[in-house]
């Protein structure tokens, strides 16, 4: 009987801990008062497995074209993922984008790169998927085309990472293959 009571108490305690709200995540953001990057200790929380950005962020952040940049690196690192930045429109409307050159990937020719399940694709500024996330590497668009790879693998060389192998080609803005590459450029 004592064993059952102790087991029940432990299960209830474990459930209470698991059900407790997650602590807020800190973020970097572009501050509208100082026009510089600042840190906000309580920026976002997880609710029902989804990120929710807190009102304090929107009071402080600089809004460009109806969205703000947010770097939630502690959250992504804690989840065992690579750094990701987010473009955020509201508490529940956001798009994770590739962390590129110390900040968020930027929109080029109307599209930005984002990842889903470890693959790269392209989204527009309304956060609609424009080209499905199916590439292991994808460059920004330039002159209406982007270099992509399926099956390439990262190779660490000291502090640098290069890509090797895979099938390389260019796509147009509709995602159609437009030219082949004999071997990867990296």
Image (cartoon, rainbow, N blue to C red):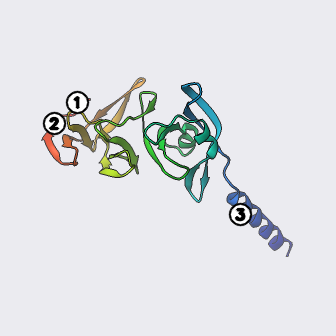
The answer to which quarter of the image holds residue 97 is: top left
- Residue under numbered circle 1: 185
The tag on residue 47 is none
7 w.r.t. 124: above or below: below
Mark 1 lies on a secondary structure that is loop
Q: Is residue 94 left or right of residue 126?
A: right
- Residue under numbered circle 3: 15
Q: Is residue 19 left or right of residue 99?
A: right
Task: Write the residue at 38% across / 34% down.
Answer: 106
Task: Write the residue at 52% across / 34% down.
Answer: 62
Looking at the image, do the residues carrying marks 1 and 2 touch, with CB atoms under 8 Å apart? yes
Mark 3 lies on a secondary structure that is helix
47 w.r.t. 56: above or below: below
Mark 2 lies on a secondary structure that is loop
Q: Is residue 136 left or right of residue 27?
A: left
Task: Name the N-terminal-most of marks 1 and 3.
Answer: 3
Distance of label 3 from label 2 (alpha carbons) = 54 Å
Question: Is residue 176 or residue 76 the one in the foreground?
Answer: 176
The tag on residue 181 is 2
Looking at the image, do the residues carrying marks 1 and 3 touch, with CB atoms under 8 Å apart? no
Disc 3 packing (10 Å; few <14; some 14–19; many ≥20): few
Which quarter of the figure is the N terminus placed in? bottom right
- Residue 29's x, y, as percent? 55, 34
Question: Is residue 159 or residue 16 the one in the foreground?
Answer: 16
- Residue 85's x, y, as percent? 48, 38
Task: Name the N-terminal-most of marks 3 and 2.
Answer: 3
């Amino acid at each position: 009987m004592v064993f059952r009571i102790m087991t029940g108490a432990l299960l209830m305690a474990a459930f209470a801990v698991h059900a407790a709200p997650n602590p807020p995540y800190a973020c970097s953001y572009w501050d509208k008062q100082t026009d510089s990057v600042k840190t906000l200790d309580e920026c976002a929380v997880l609710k029902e497995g989804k990120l929710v950005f807190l009102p304090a962020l929107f009071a402080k952040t600089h809004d460009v074209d109806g969205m703000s940049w947010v770097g939630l690196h502690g959250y992504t690192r804690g989840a065992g993922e690579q750094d990701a930045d987010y473009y955020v429109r509201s508490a529940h409307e956001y798009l994770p984008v590739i962390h590129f050159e110390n900040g968020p990937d930027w929109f080029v020719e109307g599209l930005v790169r984002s990842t889903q399940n470890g693959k790269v694709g392209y989204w527009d500024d309304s956060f609609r998927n424009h080209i499905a996330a199916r590439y292991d590497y994808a460059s920004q668009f330039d002159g209406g085309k982007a270099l992509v790879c399926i099956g390439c693998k990262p190779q660490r060389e000291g502090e640098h990472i290069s890509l090797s192998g895979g099938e390389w080609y260019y796509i147009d803005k509709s995602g159609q293959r437009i030219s082949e590459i004999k071997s990867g450029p990296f």
